[in-house]
Image (spheres, helix red, strand yellow):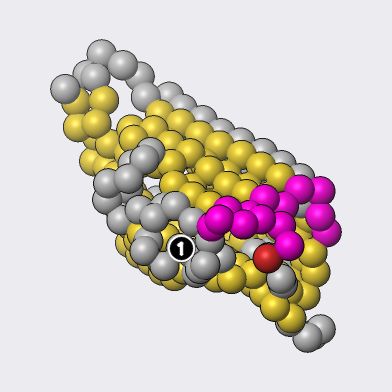
Amino acid sequence: MSEIKKFDLTKYGEDKEVRLENLSIINSRIDSSHYKRIIFIKCTFENVVFEGHYEDGEGSVIFIECKAKQCVFYGNLGKTYVELRDNIFKNCMIENIIMEWRGEQSTIKENGFFECTFKNMKLDRDIEFISQTICGGTIEDIYFLSSNMVENQFLNLQMNNTQIMAYFTDNIMASVIFKNVTLEWEIDENYDDGNLFYQCDTFGLICCRHEN
């Protein structure tokens, strides 16, 4: 494996904010702990480790139209605003992520995650999670609170020891193996939630639909 070197963010911003656009970054470590706001637009990452965030637990992290391959993401995001839109993640590890209650509603929308691992995450936060494709890989040891979890596709993956509480509608779950998973959502009693489970192993799944 190639040596991982610290990526110098200082040339891309000042006053606690950095903005990187149309860059290709490989074999690097990006530590954002000294910046309150960090923005990546149309960047390409390979074998990059992203760690930390702003030291007081607030600020924002934004990825738009980026591509990440064999990268690692971790850190305590606290009340950080997170926005991920139109990105592609392949063979990435997203782990040990904490998001606290309060703070601005975060948005994760129209991203593709392929053969990625999500592990040991506590997302106790108001998060819009809309139109993702998550194909392959594993989701394990996750607590996820979402105001809107809509029109997502979960395909050919395994989900273990996970609790999801969300407004959960129009999602497709195909060839998913569930082990010790609780899915809980609230919806109007006259509304068809539109969720589809196809060729899933649901022996380890508990669904709790609360009608109001």
Q: Residue at x 81, y 84 (%)?
A: 2
87 lies left or right of 202: right
Check the image and name the residue furthest to the left: 212
Q: Image check: 141 left or right of 113?
A: left
Q: Residues within 10 Å of mark 1 (few under 14, many from 20)?
A: many
Q: Is residue 82 left or right of residue 167?
A: right
Q: Examine the structure image and report whether residue 13 is included in the region drawn in magenta.
A: yes
The residue lying at 62 percent from left, 61 percent from top is 116
Q: Position of residue 199 (x, y in %)?
A: 53, 44
> Which picture quadrant has residue 91?
bottom right
Residue visible at 50% across and 68% down in the picture: 33
- Up/down of 171 relative to 14, above or below: above
Image quadrant holding the C terminus, namely top left
Residue 143 is situated, as x and y percent measured from the top left of the image, at 33, 57
Chain part drawn in magenta: 11-24
Image coordinates for residue 132, horizontal then vertical, percent: 57, 40
- Quadrant in which the N terminus appears: bottom right
Outermost residue to the top: 190
Question: Would residue 83 be seen by someone viewing this image from the given angle?
Answer: yes
Q: Is residue 71 visible?
A: no
Q: Residue at x 34, y 35 (%)?
A: 147
Q: Residue 35 location in percent, x, y?
A: 53, 61
Q: Nearer the viewer, residue 212 or 144?
A: 144
Q: Which residue is mark 1?
A: 54
Identify residue type, mark 1: Tyr
